[in-house]
Amino acid sequence: MIYNSMKLIVVGLGSMGKRRISLLLKYFSGISICGVDINAERRLQAEKLFGINTYEDLNKAIYYEKPYAVLVCSSPASHAPVILECIRKGLHVFSEINLIQDKYKQIIKESTQNKVKLFLSSTLLYRKEIEIINEYVSNQKCKVNYRYHVGQYLPDWHPWEDYRNFFVGEKRTNGCREIFAIDLPWIIKTFGKVKDITVFKDNISTLEIEYPDNYIVVLEHDNGNKGVFIADVVSRQAVRDFLAYSENLHISWDGTPKGLYKYNIERRTLERIETYTERIETFNTTETEYKYADKIVENAYLDEITEFINKITGKPYDERYTFEDDMYTLQLIDRIEGIKNGGR
């Protein structure tokens, strides 16, 4: 994909910022990148890995680099002021998941006033496996039940740093909340908006955190579909285990590109559903923090960036998630956590 002389700023040079930079440099000819991070070590690492300019201060980067758009890849609690600053300078904004609806209404209002385009990441909605599950469920003429478990031991999320110093260790942007924020968008799209929820939560580990380390959530959807969503930061083996079933459907997924299966009722056999013919790779480094598990597929991350670039350059695009959609999701997560009126 060729784009002539477009400059983008990536704010936040941690693992996600590096992922976005590597994809942009590899697959988008003509786009140049600079980075912003308050951490000097991360800036130096990004300069060495990608050969880009980096800055400690966002305003200085904007002044010298004259960017067209910004990708906000810093920790979620920092997003709102960064997004608003970029909007007020007339820059289009791509945002990673925010986890908290801080200043959402103001962001939406000011983006319209300043004619700035927003794009919000929801990577699983761009996974081919999710598209196929959605199609099968949507074609059912009866109610569908599901069971879904997503979990990973919190110290294993970023093994190169102490989980107590990582945003998922904090109560406001905790690990279970991130799991819900990542997965509920596709659950809602596939099974419908939520009518009622029942929540079981507690702590079953010795992790030094101030939030429940596991949730069992029963969801009843408006259309009669219902399911159980288990989210935790306790599971020693990283797991993404999904099953949906009805009288005429039995489909399962283990979170990997080759792990989607459908039970053939006529043949009484379990059959794998082909999803990807090619799996792309990102920039490969020897840095510990830049190695990803098998359940992480780069295709969806690239697809998100492509749709964002298409949107801000006036090309046809397929945007699957918005700030308005995320307001609904985050309000639902607040209900699950027992937070009233968005207060924390």
Image (cartoon, helix red, strand yellow):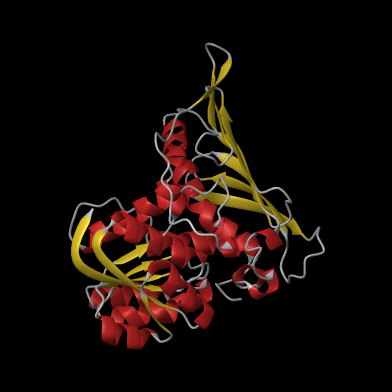
The outermost residue toward the top is 267
Q: Nearer the viewer, residue 50 or 332?
A: 50
Q: Nearer the viewer, residue 148 or 44?
A: 44
Q: Position of residue 260 (x, y in %)?
A: 52, 32
Does 128 appear above or below 305? above
Q: Quadrant of residue 64?
A: bottom left
Does 260 appear above or below 153? above
Q: Position of residue 271 (x, y in %)?
A: 53, 22
Q: Position of residue 67 (x, y in %)?
A: 26, 76
Q: Is 293 placed left or right of 188 in the picture?
A: right
Whether residue 83 can be seen here: yes
Q: Nearer the viewer, residue 331 or 15?
A: 15
Q: Quadrant of residue 170?
A: bottom right
State the residue at coordinates (37%, 57%).
23
Q: Position of residue 125 (x, y in %)?
A: 43, 48
Q: Is 109 placed left or right of 178 in the picture?
A: left
Q: Quadrant of residue 243?
A: top right
Count of labels in the image: 0
Whether residue 39 can be seen here: no
Q: Is 121 placed left or right of 112 in the picture?
A: right
- Where's the C terminus, which quadrant? bottom right
